[in-house]
């Protein structure tokens, strides 16, 4: 197998080649067809997330086919198409797991962070945390669903939305700060549900603003601008702590500001009056398998399409650089 490997934080990935591993009991070996490039990968590579496995194969938006199965694998078959998300395994016995909050598991493993991921031709995964995928979608186009889509969906739910909203349920005016991979997927679902989407981009990024409007946003502007109406809720996908007080200014009384990233720069001091009147600031941590099943069932109903820029596996460093500098719209995807 071939892989792009992180040997030390803040250094470029290096190509490595070795024999594909054999799956242990409960595991599957996946022949990878596509792996999305997520902002969390940047945080891992840049050393902003501590205690990663090293050396490490990054990547946690994996689409591929089962090449081999270890003992005791149930519900999957060789050659079946599957997806592998960020949540790679949980203990199943801690208080969080027992209360339906496996995303907060005390001993969770994470794909492309504490276990090797998908910047490779093959990967090992715990079969219980893989999801069968429909055959009708292109591999690269479906890869961003495995994290950008899922974390966007969980953030959306925490902002007050549900899978089957009525006319007055959930936030009607929703702000999305940072219009990248997650926001471009979520905007389509929220618009399909009849919400008014307000997209906030880097200051002066007219291309991203036009992209947001093409996906149904009723307004798009810089993150320093005030939307034309108070928001019911806002989701911050950009890893910029300074956006928290700005989003609080934009939401109405009782509104929610959801921080959807695993890493964010420090939040600056802000006056209590921005939080007063029962406004809330929430964070999203990881995902659950239930989130994935719910989201993947909703995607075809909403007709969600992904905008992807494809890179060969050997160009993983270029993909990370383009994501870091905002040189692409939608999502980046590696193909072996």
Image: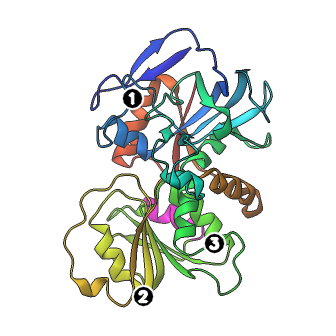
Q: Which residue is mark 2?
A: 252
| Label 1 residue SS | loop
Q: Position of residue 23 (x, y in %)?
A: 64, 19
For the residues bearing labels 2 and 1, Cβ distance under 8 angstroms: no
**Secondary structure of the residue carrying numbered label 2:** strand
In the rendered structure, find residue 227 and report the number of the disc placed on it.
none
Marks 2 & 3, CB-CB < 8 Å contact: no
Left or right: 216 in relation to 58: right
Q: Quadrant of the N terminus?
A: top right
* 165 to the left or right of 101: right
Badge nearest the viewer, 2 or 1: 1
Q: Residue furthest top?
A: 19
Q: Is residue 94 magenta?
A: no
Q: Mark 2 to mark 1: distance in Å?
A: 42 Å
Q: Is residue 149 visible?
A: no
- Residue found at x 67% / y 30%: 64
CB within 8 Å, label 1 to label 3: no
- Is 185 situated left or right of 304 in this image? left
Q: Is residue 252 above or below residue 268?
A: below
Q: Nearer the viewer, residue 190 or 78?
A: 78
Q: Which residues are magenta?
A: 207-216
Which mark is drawn over residue 191?
3
Q: Residue at x 75, y 34 (%)?
A: 81
Q: Image quadrant for the C terminus? A: top right
Task: In this rendered view, identify the residue nearer to me: 330 or 111.
Answer: 111
Q: Name the one closer to the observer, 181 or 279.
A: 279
Q: Does residue 248 lie above or below 303 as drawn?
A: below
Residue 92 quadrant: top right
Residue 126, percent across and down?
62, 32
Ranked by sequence position, the earlier of labels 2 and 3 is: 3
What residue did someone put label 1 on?
53
């Amino acid at each position: 197998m071939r892989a792009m490997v992180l040997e030390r934080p803040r250094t470029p990935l290096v190509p490595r080649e070795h024999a594909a591993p054999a799956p242990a009991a409960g595991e599957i070996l996946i022949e990878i067809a596509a792996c999305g490039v997520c902002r969390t990968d940047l945080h891992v590579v840049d050393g902003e997330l501590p205690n990663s496995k090293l050396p490490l194969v990054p990547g946690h938006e994996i689409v591929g086919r089962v090449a081999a199965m270890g003992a005791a694998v149930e519900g999957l078959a060789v050659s079946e198409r599957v997806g592998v998300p960020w949540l790679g395994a949980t203990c199943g016995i801690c208080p969080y797991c027992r209360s339906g909050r496996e995303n907060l598991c005390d001993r969770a493993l994470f794909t492309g962070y504490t276990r090797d991921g998908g910047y490779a031709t093959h990967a090992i995964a715990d079969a219980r945390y893989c999801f069968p995928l429909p055959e009708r979608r292109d591999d690269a186009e479906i890869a961003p669903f495995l994290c950008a889509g899922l974390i966007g969906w969980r953030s959306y739910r925490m902002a007050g939305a549900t899978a089957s909203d009525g006319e007055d349920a959930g936030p009607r005016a929703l702000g999305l700060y940072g219009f990248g991979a997650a926001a471009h997927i979520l905007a389509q679902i929220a618009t399909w549900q009849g919400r008014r989407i307000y997209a906030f981009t880097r200051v002066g990024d007219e291309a991203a603003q036009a992209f947001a409007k093409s996906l149904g946003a009723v307004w798009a502007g810089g993150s320093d601008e005030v939307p034309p109406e108070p928001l019911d809720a806002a989701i911050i996908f950009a890893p910029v702590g300074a956006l928290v007080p700005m989003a609080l200014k934009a939401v109405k009384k009782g509104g929610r500001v959801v921080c959807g990233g695993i890493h964010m720069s420090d939040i600056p001091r802000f006056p209590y009056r921005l939080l007063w009147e029962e406004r809330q600031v929430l964070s999203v941590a990881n995902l659950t398998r239930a989130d994935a099943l719910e989201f993947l069932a909703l995607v075809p109903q909403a007709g969600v399409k992904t905008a992807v820029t494809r890179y060969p596996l050997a160009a993983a460093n270029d993909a990370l650089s383009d994501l870091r500098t905002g040189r692409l719209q939608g999502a980046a995807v590696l193909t072996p």
